[in-house]
């Protein structure tokens, strides 16, 4: 799974959905995951005021996302899930 770079997480290079203990969802290309951080590239963020999360994820799976952040590091303690965006049916 993913590209094979020494020292990188198995999801490196894969577009993923990161769920958090807060209300935000993040979609971006996984750069690395370690015990402290999840680092994503070309990241879009879903906030509650953006509407229904499931509809937003379905659109992201079908059409991709418009990145709001070139690089974003998320505190691993806030992360509740990480999964490939490709697992979501558009």
Image (tube, rainbow, N blue to C red):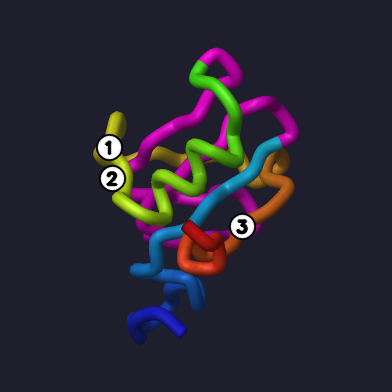
The spot of residue 41 in percent (x, y) is: 32, 49
User: Magenta segment range?
Assistant: 21-49
Residue name at image x 55 percent, y 21 percent: 51
Q: What distance separates the C-alpha of mark 1 from that of mark 2? A: 5 Å
Q: Nearer the viewer, residue 68 or 5?
A: 68
Q: Which mark is residue 24?
A: none
**What secondary structure do most residues of the magenta stretch adopt?**
strand
Residue named by callout 1: 67
Residue named by callout 2: 42
Residue named by callout 3: 82
Q: Are marks 1 and 2 in contact (CB under 8 Å)?
A: yes
Residue 47 appears left or right of 7: right
User: Is 44 situated above or below 36?
Assistant: above
User: Is 69 situated above or below 15?
Assistant: above
Residue name at image x 43 percent, y 77 percent: 7
Q: Does 15 lie within the magenta span?
A: no
Question: Upstream in the sequence, badge 3 or badge 2?
Answer: 2
Residue 22 appears left or right of 61: right
Q: What distance separates the C-alpha of mark 1 from that of mark 3? A: 18 Å
């Amino acid at each position: 799974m993913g590209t094979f770079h020494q020292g990188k997480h198995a999801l490196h290079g894969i577009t993923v959905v990161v769920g958090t203990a807060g209300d935000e969802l993040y979609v971006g290309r996984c750069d690395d995951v370690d015990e402290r951080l999840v680092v994503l590239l070309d990241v879009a963020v879903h906030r509650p005021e953006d509407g229904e999360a499931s509809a937003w994820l379905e659109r992201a799976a079908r059409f991709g996302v418009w990145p709001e952040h070139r690089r974003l590091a998320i505190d691993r303690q806030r992360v509740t899930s990480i999964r490939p965006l490709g697992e979501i049916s558009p």
